[in-house]
Amino acid sequence: MTTSSTPSATPSVLDRLRRLVGGQPDDGRLGSKVKAAQALDLVRDGATLLDVRESSEWKSGHAPGAIHVALGNIDQAPRRLHQGRPIVVMCASGMRSRTAAKHLRGLGFDAASLAGGLGAWQRAGGAVRR
C-alpha cells in the first residue's frame, strides 16, 4: 500500500480553524488584523500601507512608501486607495488602525490593522524614514 505525500489543495479543518481564530477569513481576504511580519510580506507583494497617525507623528518617522491620512480625515482615504489592492493600516500601537481598517472594510476595501503599530513594524525589520 502506498500513500501520497503530496499535500492536499484543500485546507484541512485544522488549518481553517487556525485562520478563523487568528482573525483570517477563509476567503483569501486579510481579516481584521495582521502581524508585522505578514504586513511586511503583504506590502512587498503590493499591498498599500496606510498610516493613520497625526501629522506630527508622521513627521517624526514613517515607513517609506506609506500613504498618510490621519484618522480624523479617514473619509478622504478612499480617494488615495485602490479598491482591488489589500490595505495594511498602521498607527503607533494598533488602536487607531483598528478603527480605520474597520471603517475601510465597511466601504468595501480589504483592510487590516497592523497589530502593534509602528514599533512592531520596526521590530519585524520594516524601514522607518525620519
Image (cartoon, rainbow, N blue to C red):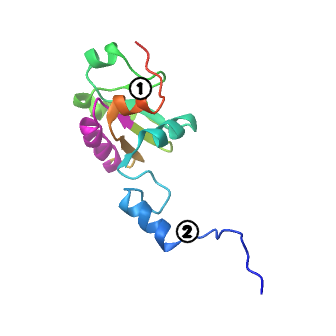
Image quadrant occupied by the N terminus: bottom right
User: At x 50% / y 45%, what residue is drawn?
Assistant: 84
Q: Taking 14 as reference, is 39 above or below it?
A: above
Q: Based on the displayed image, in which of its 4 quarters is residue 36 positioned? A: top left
Q: Taking 21 as reference, is 75 above or below it?
A: above
In the image: residue 106, left or right of residue 65: left
Residue 38 colored in magenta in the image:
no
Tell me the kind of residue under disc 2.
Pro
Image quadrant occupied by the C terminus: top left
Q: Which residue is mark 2?
A: 11
Badge 1 element: strand
Q: Based on the displayed image, in which of its 4 quarters is residue 54 positioned? A: top left
Q: Taking 1 as reference, is 94 above or below it?
A: above
* In front of the other: 46 or 108: 46
Tell me the kind of residue under disc 1.
Ile
Residue 100 colored in magenta in the image:
yes
Q: Based on the displayed image, in which of its 4 quarters is residue 59 positioned? A: top left
Percent of width and height locating residue 20: 39, 63
Identify the mark nearer the N-term, 1 or 2. Answer: 2
User: At x 37% / y 56%, what residue is drawn?
Assistant: 23
Percent of width and height locating residue 108: 38, 49
Q: Which residues are magenta?
A: 89-106
User: At x 32% / y 43%, what residue is drawn?
Assistant: 101
| Disc ID at residue 67 | 1
Q: Outermost residue toward the bottom? A: 1
Q: Outermost residue toward the left? A: 72
